[in-house]
Amino acid sequence: MRLDAVKWLIASHAKVGGTIYHQLPSLRAQLATVPRVQLPTRVLDLRPSSFSSDRLTFEDMRLLISNGETMGHYMTLSHRWGEAHNLELTRENLPAFTKRIEFRHLPRTYEHAVIVARSLGFRYLWIDALCIIQHDEHDWLRESAKMATIYHNASCNIAAHTALDDSHGFLWPNFAQSLADSAIMKRGWVFQERILSKRIIHFARGTSFFEDASGVIKPDGIAPENYDPITNNKMNLEDGLVSQDEWYHLVERFTTCNLTFETDRLPAVAGLSEYYAQQTIDGKYLWGLWSGSFHQGLLWVTTAQDTNELLEGYRAAGMQPPSWSWARWAGKIRY
């Protein structure tokens, strides 16, 4: 299977830890120096695969239930689900998935993520739809609370900008697209994933590029047009320089994003709040605000009257924010 987008990783530049590498083997070697971590509760075990610059060969995979007891390196995927969920983990297929998941049955976006992960030498890959039990509120609540750790501990994140849904894929070269119109850049969950991920390989139409806390690079060494890397937020999070003002600025930006379920506003930033709480922010986290700057946190207004409504229908008891929280209201807010 010849893939120009993967071959770009061999011939062009990728920036890892401040060093420029011109060959895929070098990138693989550098990523391999990242310390091993505890794997998430469940990951896709891609198993050994052969690789060459012209051809990738693949075996089937399986779902590994590690329960945090297995150490290793893994990648994550940021993507847009779409309306049709072609393949997902359920209570019913869980036993079968632990034995075998056929590569040929993967939706195209997941297939391409496996291609990238294997080409970079990774054995493990985390995809939400295949690693969180779907239609199971208990498992969703437990695993969604671990998003911060899952994305922050990953060696690298794959951002599938061009995949309009799971069946679309993202390794399609020679087709221009503005990153401002990316399928995933406006997703609320991806907003958190971008900040928490230490490294991201972005696949957009007509270009591929690498991002870490120090910036963005693509083959010509210039950051792509219309791309906001959130670099300062990444650096501040790593260096422990986060502030309450920065939190409320992020909240403003987050409310411009879309969620399949608007009531997931707080779960979609729970990972960020966890890491901010570990840094220098004073006080307790209270429904999207911080007790150390509670009065400031209340100084928000909605920006669109047509969305100025209270959200109802939360997934579980105890998840409904009070009316004074920005998270209880639909639409954009500003401070």
Image: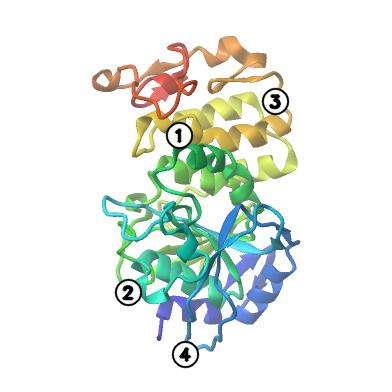
Three-letter code, disc 3: Ile
Q: How far is the residue under mark 4 from the one under mark 3?
A: 50 Å
User: Which tag, 2 or 3, sits closer to the chain's start?
Assistant: 2
Query: What secondary structure is marked by label 3?
Result: loop
Q: Which residue is mark 4?
A: 54
Position above or below: 307 against 236: above
Q: Residue at x 38, y 71 (%)?
A: 171
In the rendered image, is residue 85 in sight?
A: yes
User: Which tag, 1 or 3, sits closer to the chain's start?
Assistant: 1
Q: Which residue is mark 1?
A: 254
Q: How far is the residue under mark 2 from the one under mark 1?
A: 31 Å
Query: What secondary structure is marked by label 2?
Result: loop
Q: How far is the residue under mark 1 from the one under mark 3?
A: 19 Å
Q: Report if the CB atoms under discs 2 and 3 are less than 8 Å apart.
A: no
Relative horizontal placement of residue 28, taking residue 216 as reference (left or right): right
Q: How far is the residue under mark 2 from the one under mark 3?
A: 45 Å
User: Which tag, 4 or 3, sits closer to the chain's start?
Assistant: 4
Q: Residues within 10 Å of mark 1 (few under 14, many from 20)?
A: many
User: Which tag, 2 or 4, sits closer to the chain's start?
Assistant: 4
- Which of the labelled discs sits on residue 281, or is there none? 3
Q: Residues within 10 Å of mark 2 (few under 14, many from 20)?
A: few
In the rendered image, is residue 205 in sight?
A: no
Please tell me in which quadrant of the rendered image residue 312 appears.
top left
User: Which tag, 4 or 1, sits closer to the chain's start?
Assistant: 4
Q: Residues within 10 Å of mark 4 (few under 14, many from 20)?
A: few
Q: Which residue is mark 2?
A: 174
User: Which tag, 2 or 1, sits closer to the chain's start?
Assistant: 2
| Residue 325 place in picture, x, y as percent | 47, 16
Relative horizontal placement of residue 211, taking residue 163 as reference (left or right): right
